[in-house]
Amino acid sequence: MTTAQAEPTTEHPAVKYGKIGVLLVNLGTPDGTDPTSMRRYLKEFLSDKRVIEWSRLFWYPILYGIVLNTRPRKVGKAYELIWNKELNESWLRTYTRNQAALMAESFTDQPQVVVDWAMRYGQPSIASRLEALQKAGCERILVFPLYPQYAAATTATVNDKAFEALLKMRWQPALRTVPPYHDDPVYIDALATSIGSHLSSLDWEPEVVLASFHGIPKSYFEKGDPYYCQCQKTARLLREKLGWPEEKLQVTFQSRFGPEEWLQPYTDATVERLAKNGVKRIAVINPGFVSDCLETLEEIAGQAAESFLHNGGEKFAHIPCLNDSAEGMAVLNHVVHRELEGWL
Ligand SMILES: C=CC1=C(C)c2cc3[nH]c(cc4nc(cc5[nH]c(cc1n2)c(C)c5CCC(=O)O)C(CCC(=O)O)=C4C)c(C)c3C=C
Ligand SMILES: [Fe+2]
Ligand SMILES: [Fe+2]
């Protein structure tokens, strides 16, 4: 008697292959300024253990009991002031998408490279874009957290999320992550050029320029986060490039959240002190932000400017982030081409 045996299958689903993906990832942004969108965004953001390191037992009652009931409305109003009305989205989203499109153009001679973008919080998610890149045939993917200075709260959480997405894949792409580029000469040159061209467009000269970085709690620094030192190095190299003394380019830290001590000196207190001490003209640059966002447009160009003028200052300028400018794209393209070495 013979038994019919199943033929071993020689087929698996058709797959595309041979491409290299580049995924630009920025922090994230709400889908709208209404309280529901704001709450969804803040809930995802502020539930991240890399951002708020307190025990969940302590933090969640505060997050769900207070923060998510009060902050969405308040912060939504701030977002409204800086919303990109034409596209009905935040500028962070507009710039990140533009950066990906412009970077893709820099690879027209290398059509095997596919450039995409995602957000750590909100949409499009890292998992959805990694999956899309893989479906498009990317066997190798370079994940680029858009932060010149490394912090666990920013760079590491992007990388965590990317590797978490790979957990669910049967056939994983090879993944590389972009390291911080806080001391890269192309980045330092771009900042110096941006300061130079912005200041030469004014009919006045600042007495002091603040290099204002987003802060982190001081305790994160004490636990070994390299962020503070990388911010200081960026500022030192920029000062050297510009040939300025330490008093002319001062480092400060902004965007404090919660009751803990954060990295000092604080931007808001410094702006107020300078004005009260008789400084009449200042400019602020945000070297740690790849794109303008709530923290630069509302907190600096809005609130800090108002505080400076209110306390006796006379002229205030906010130097825009590198965004999708030619200098900004030169930095991002330079870093990506370097990190793709061996793959291209
Ligand atoms: C403990 C809380 C926070 C840490 C730590 C933190 C670090 C950190 N953040 C950025 C960059 C951005 N943060 C932005 C907004 C923002 N940040 C926090 C809190 C922490 N950030 C909150 C709660 C918010 C939302 C607004 C608010 O509720 O105040 C943004 C802007 C996003 C946008 O859509 O415009 C950026 C960018 C860095 C670089 C950093 C650590 C180095
Ligand atoms: Fe932040
Ligand atoms: Fe803020």
Image (cartoon, helix red, strand yellow):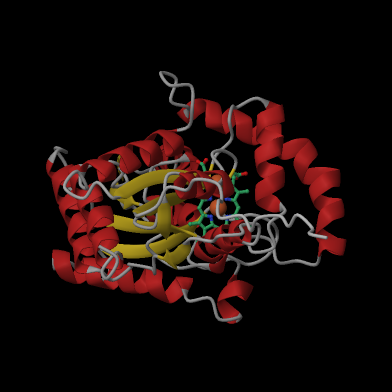
Residue at 63 percent across and 54 percent down: it is: 257
Quadrant of the snapshot with the C terminus: bottom left
Viewer-side residue, 312 vs 40:
40
- Judged left or right of residue 76, residue 23 is left
Residue 233 placement (x, y as % from top left): 33, 74
Residue 200 vs residue 91: left or right?
left
Horizontal side of residue 132 vs 288, given as left or right: right
Residue 145 visible in the snapshot: no
Residue drawn at x 40%, y 44% as measured from the top left: 116
Q: Is residue 253 left or right of residue 115?
A: right
Residue drawn at x 64%, y 62% is 167
Residue 318, given in percent of the width and then of the height, sits at 32, 43
Establish if 197 lies above or below 165: above
The single residue placed furthest to the front in the displayed view is 1
Q: Residue at x 48, y 42 (%)?
A: 299
**Which one is nearer the viewer's eye here, 56 or 196?**
56
| Labels in figure, total | 0
Which quadrant: the N terminus?
Answer: bottom right
From this view, report whether residue 245 is shown above or below residue 41.
Answer: below
Picture coordinates of residue 8, whole percent (x, y): 64, 58
Q: Give the x, y percent position of residue 97.
A: 38, 37
Q: Determine which quarter of the picture holds residue 105.
A: top left
Residue 7 in sight in this render: yes
The answer to whether 98 is drawn above or below residue 259 in the figure is above
